[in-house]
Image (cartoon, rainbow, N blue to C red):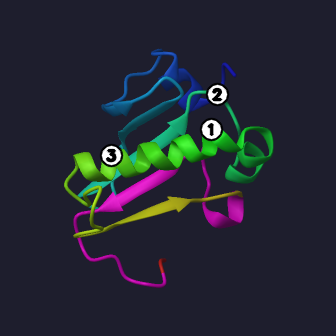
Amino acid sequence: MTDCLFCRMVAGEIPADVVHETERTLAFRDIAPQAPTHVLVVPKDHHATAGLLVGADPQLLAEVVAAAHAVAVQEGLATDEAPEPGYRLVFNSGPQAGQTVHHVHGHVLGGRALTWPPG
């Protein structure tokens, strides 16, 4: 999709601070971080929401989650053996949930205590 911000980032048309990449996923730092670590993980293929992605390609959604965990390990928020100190993985789905870019993306948040419920 030529008008999708994240598709354009995947294509290299718009610069991104990439921290992790696989054949089918891309992870980059959020430009308006809400925590010391705030990384977005997207599938390289365009899917509007997590629900639409799981219906079309459940394995790709699993790869997005695996990439998010790899980012958390890389950023020192977890290890493969333990969840310390921890991180939050958030998928906003639809406008009432706060999704502003309609290309599914997971937010990896960490580096500070994250309260519940979120805002």
Residue at image x 38%, y 22%? Answer: 15
Q: Is residue 102 found inside the magenta-colored segment of the image? A: yes
Callout 2 touching callout 1 (CB < 8 Å): yes
- Residue range (magenta): 95-117
Q: Which mark, by number, is residue 60?
A: 1
Count residues near mark 1 (Cα–Cα under 10 Å), then give few for <14, some for 14-19, many for 20+: some
Task: Name the residue type under label 3.
Answer: Val
Image coordinates of residue 108 in percent, x first then y, are 39, 55
Distance between mark 2 and mark 3 Cα atoms: 19 Å
Image coordinates of residue 94 in percent, x first then y, are 71, 57
Identify whether 43 is placed above or below 3: below
Residue 3 in view (yes/no): yes
> Closer to the camera: disc 2 or disc 1?
1
Chain-order first, disc 2 or disc 3: 2
Callout 2 touching callout 3 (CB < 8 Å): no
Label 3: which residue? 71
Residue at image x 60%, y 50%? Answer: 100
SS label for mark 1: helix
